[in-house]
Image (cartoon, rainbow, N blue to C red):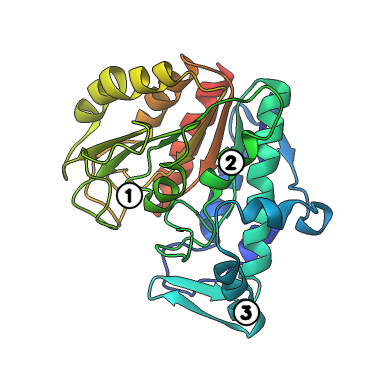
Amino acid sequence: MLSVIYSDEFLDHKTGRYHPEKPERLTVIVNALKSAAFAEKITWLTPTPASARPSLIPTLLKAHDPAYINKVKEIATSGGGYLDGDTPVSSRSYDVALLAVSAWLDGVNTVLTSANPAFVLARPPGHHAERNTGMGFCLFSHAAIAALYALEQPGVNRVAILDWDVHHGNGTQAIVETHPKIAYCSLHQYPCYPGTGAASEGGLYDNVLNLPIPPGSNITIYQPLIETKVIPFLAEFQADLLIVSAGYDANQSDPLSNINLQPQDYALFTNACLGLTRKILFGLEGGYDFTSLSQSVLATLESCLI
């Protein structure tokens, strides 16, 4: 069985009719999973309500400044607005974002308890959110928060984050690169938004590996990097938990990138990770073409069930 953590409340983060990060992203994935050949092997879990998790805000404060958290809350309470031109906050966005954080923390607990993968199907995404601000559709930095939370759990001494979203996770890296017990590895189109993620950025403890990918690349570029760079880096770090910022916007059909991956390529990525450990928490980041997005999530989850 494979756990998927999801709530219809994640659809209540409203971004506007023409914004690419829209509620329907989750709807198409849910529909695809419920009609998949392996649907009976999925356990659907509802995230713990933020109100039932007293430690949620203290955990959030490990990654974000209180003034920024309050800013998101105030914008939502006032009826909505924008953090920047790309990052809307609607009236329910603060509550939904807190629930997304809670879902990622539930994911950590689920993986550590079961020693098997879990997938957090939540929005808004998170890897661009920095300590003092959100950007790039992201409000709170889920992967970084989950990693910091995981280090507080029994038996977890090191956590690794693999970010295969087509955009560099500037927020995740900025939060974790000074932490000796967290490693961060990103494969991302370069140059591309947000302009960070140069190969020269190694982290304070050599705990960061950035692998810029030139526009137009396909799996023939990715596969050797996975095999000769990513997996050795992660293996050497010897993490007790692997968190994957699972963005699917590197697909050829995605409107926000110029990388030519296919949905089945994510099975290769997933299998490479499973070769290291089954203690993997996948969490949705980007992916804006509905068909390739849902197919890619299917490829990821099906690989975990083989």
Whole-percent x, y for residue 268 in the image: 38, 23
Q: Nearer the viewer, residue 135 or 44?
A: 135
Dot label at residue 188: none
Decide which of tag 1 and tag 3 comes sooner along the chain: 3
Quadrant position of the N terminus in the picture: top right
Mark 3 belongs to which amino acid? Glu
Q: Is 63 positioned to the left or the right of 110 in the image?
A: left
Dot label at residue 148: 2
Q: Is 13 positioned to the left or the right of 106 in the image?
A: left
Residue ID at (46%, 58%): 129
What is the quadrant of residue 217 in the picture?
A: top left
**Residue holding disc 3:** 74
Residue ID at (45%, 22%): 273
Decide which of tag 2 and tag 3 comes sooner along the chain: 3
Mark 1: secondary structure = loop
**Residue holding disc 1:** 167
Mark 2 belongs to which amino acid? Leu
Whole-percent x, y for residue 174 in the image: 40, 50
What is the quadrant of residue 288 in the picture?
A: bottom left
Q: Is residue 30 visible?
A: yes
